[in-house]
Amino acid sequence: MSRAMRIIQIIPGSGGSFYCGNCLRDSKFVEALRASDHQVTKIPMYLPLFADEHDLTGEIPVFYGAISIYLKQQFPLFRKAPAWLDRMLNAKPMLKLASRFAGSTRAAGLEEMTVSMLLGEEGQQKAELDKMVDWIAEHCKPDVIHLSNALLVGLALRLREKIGVPVICSLQDEDQWVDVMQPSSRKMVWDLMSKRGEHITKFIAVSSWYAEEMKKVMHLPEERLERVHIGVYPENYSFRLPSEKKRNIGYVSRMCHDLGMDILVDAFILLKQDRAFDDVELHITGGSTGDDRKFIHSQKRRIHQHGLSDMVKYHGDFEAQGLKDFFSEVAVISVPVRKGEAFGIYLLESMSSGVPVVQPALGAFPEIVALSGGGITYEPNTPEALVAALKQMLSDPQQLDDIARKGREGVERHFHVEGQVHKMLEVYKSVTQEAGVLVSR
């Protein structure tokens, strides 16, 4: 490529309250793009990202502040609120606090808001859209704009009109948001995503399995779709063989019902009925939101009722060193997501750390396990099937070590972020050359 590219990544934040796989995925891609001397600006939406960044001289604001747009959607009076009130509601400390409350990341009950966002310049958030686009036009001169997921396709038309560059969009776990909505809203949202997606230059699916799923629900032709896996820097993780640690089981993701934490808890209870596994502990990390409090309390109560409270450890820190410490204490992980996932970056983080994975044969999990060799899959996704798979893994230390080595090698070969970034840059180069962006500048 003749020169470094200028790239904008528009990313919904989590406020740092829970392990957000999509946020991590985007952050790691940005890190690798910058390491390749490309200029990348991360623009957060709704809530702050994991760590505040200063990409330009001034501080990058959080656009579409979660508190402000919710109030304006629900109560028309707030649409005429003075600018100082908006600034107060959109302050990062306020937004980080809001991320811990119930409903801050929940789709159910936000159907009307989701539809409005997809309508873009025709929706209730038109003023927010104009504010974001004007800020980008003033502060950035991008070659390409990359949206984090298809729930943001409502931004694309105005971005293309004002900025005049291609807009591409990742496809990653949109179904997790849409499919929990009321049935009457579900079809409307998928149809809107398909219609507004016509303004996207290219879609990028994070797995082959998810590409096929989204081709069906968004009616995407093959020529508008690429596949680029998620990637990590395996060298950033401390590799340690399972045989050098206790036979502990780990869970690393948001602590909630949809991601199957209760399935693992039930499997652990069954496992502990076998005296051969008296030494095994369950370690849990990943954070939560206000919506998860009741669920987490019920799981802790169930663990207590079976006399296992001393055998379950909760890790509060799930970023950077805290995550490394977690992986150093577990021999295997399982995140038994009820519906499967489009990918699951925690699988790569685990395998890079020498921790094999035990996943249900759902979603992209079989694809990732087959490519990496770093774990096994089981079916059906029940506590009984999971405990059988865990027993198989934990009963054979040599097999566990072999799978750990294969997993680390598999991540280095197939999921190293530098390789995935190279594929992404090829997509950027293709769409910008077709649009004449690089030629004209």
Image (cartoon, helix red, strand yellow):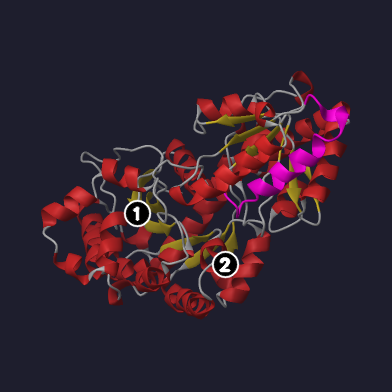
Residue 108 is situated, as x and y percent measured from the top left of the image, at 47, 65
For the point 76% across and 55% down, the residue is 381
Mark 2 vs mark 1: in front: 1
Residue 205 is situated, as x and y percent measured from the top left of the image, at 58, 60
For the point 85% across and 27% down, the residue is 397
Q: Nearer the viewer, residue 100 or 25?
A: 100
Give the distance between the C-alpha atoms of the residues marked 2 and 1, in whole angstroms.
25 Å
Residue position marked by numbered label 1 in the rendering: 45
Q: Count all numbered tags in the image, as a single digit.
A: 2
Residue 39 is situated, as x and y percent measured from the top left of the image, at 36, 44
User: The residue tagged with tag 1: helix, strand or loop?
Assistant: strand
Would residue 65 be visible to someone looking at this image? no
> Viewed as shown, does residue 402 lie left or right of 123?
right
The residue segment tinted magenta is 254-279
> Viewed as shown, does residue 378 lie left or right of 226?
right
Q: Nearer the viewer, residue 93 or 324?
A: 93
Q: Nearer the viewer, residue 237 or 289?
A: 289
Q: Quadrant of the C terminus?
A: bottom left
> Viewed as shown, does residue 80 lie left or right of 404?
left
The answer to whether residue 430 is magenta is no
Q: Residues within 10 Å of mark 2 (few under 14, many from 20)?
A: some
Would residue 217 be visible to someone looking at this image? yes
| Residue 38 vertical placement versus 152 (above, below) | above
Q: Nearer the viewer, residue 325 or 161?
A: 325
User: The residue tagged with tag 2: helix, strand or loop?
Assistant: strand
Residue position marked by numbered label 2 in the rendering: 225
| Image quadrant where residue 155 sits | bottom left
Residue type beneath disc 1: Met
Q: Residues within 10 Å of mark 1 (few under 14, many from 20)?
A: many
Question: Residue 80 — which label?
Answer: none
For the point 59% across and 46% down, the residue is 298
The answer to whether residue 272 is magenta is yes
